[in-house]
């Protein structure tokens, strides 16, 4: 089995496990789970993972903060089970774990690293255009003159 095939199988199984765990913990099944795995890092993104009530609560700054705190606490008490599954599938211990909650989009990102810095960039949905690059204003087409 090629390394690429093994990584794809690992990613698929982790996605299924993460989706089931989130559904069991919150009663809400994420729309999708994306797994990006490399030799030293596993990043799981649970898309649209917030319940309808959490989405309503997250509309205010105070509510969004409460939703984020809740999911951080939930991650802290349930992380060990996911760590064990990652170790079972990879044969390697998880050295670090972190969670990022984006209440505005409903995404929850679990990042497991081995002493490295993980930077996660969440892209806007398809169909939304952004034309600013490295602080350069968008090109509005040919200038008059």
Image (spheres, helix red, strand yellow):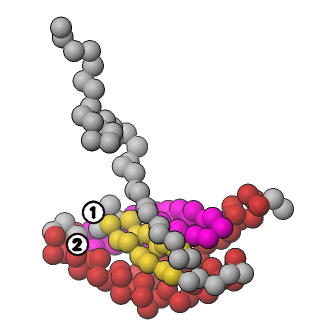
Q: Is residue 75 above or below residue 130?
A: below
Q: Is residue 65 visible?
A: yes
| Image vertical order of residue 138 relative to residue 94, above or below | above
Q: Residue at x 32, y 66 (%)?
A: 102
- Residue 49, x across and y down, in percent: 40, 69
Where residue 140 sits: x, y (%)?
A: 24, 24
Q: Is residue 40 left or right of residue 29?
A: right
Q: What SS does tag 1 mark?
A: loop
116 and 38: which is toward the camera: 116
In the rendered structure, the answer to whether residue 46 lies left or right of residue 87 reads left
Q: Earlier in the sequence, mark 2 or mark 1?
A: 2
Tell whether position 38 is magenta. yes
Q: Quadrant of residue 108?
A: bottom left
Residue that carries the numbered disc 2 in the rendered image: 64
- Where on the picture, by quarter, is residue 72? bottom left
Q: Position of residue 78 (x, y in %)?
A: 47, 88
Q: Nearer the viewer, residue 81 or 32?
A: 81
Residue at the right extreme, as displayed: 1
Any part of residue 53 in sight: no
Q: Secondary structure at mark 2?
A: helix
Q: Which residue is mark 1?
A: 104
Residue at horizontal 61 percent and vertical 70 percent from the top: 40
Q: What quarter of the picture does the C terminus occupy?
A: top left
Is residue 16 a member of the stretch shown in magenta?
no
Residue 108 placement, left or right of 37: left
Q: Which residues lie in the magenta part?
A: 28-55
Label 2 crowd (10 A; few <14 / some 14-19 / many >=20): many
Give yes or no for contact between labels 2 and 1 (Cβ–Cβ under 8 Å): yes
- Measuring from the top left, give residue 111's x and y in whole percent: 49, 72
Q: CA distance from mark 2 to mark 1?
A: 8 Å
């Amino acid at each position: 089995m090629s390394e690429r095939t093994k990584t794809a199988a690992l990613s698929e199984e982790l996605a299924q496990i993460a989706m089931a765990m989130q559904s069991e913990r919150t009663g809400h099944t994420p729309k999708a789970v994306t797994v990006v795995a490399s030799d030293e890092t596993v990043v799981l993104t649970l898309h649209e993972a917030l319940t309808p009530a959490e989405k309503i609560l997250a509309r205010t700054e105070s509510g969004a903060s409460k939703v984020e705190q809740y999911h951080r606490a939930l991650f802290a008490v349930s992380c060990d089970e996911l760590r064990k599954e990652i170790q079972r599938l990879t044969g390697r211990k998880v050295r670090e774990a972190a969670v990022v909650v984006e209440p505005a989009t409903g995404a929850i990102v679990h990042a497991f690293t081995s002493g490295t810095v993980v930077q996660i960039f969440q892209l806007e949905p398809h169909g939304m255009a952004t034309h600013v690059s490295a602080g350069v204003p968008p090109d509005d087409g040919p200038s008059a003159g």
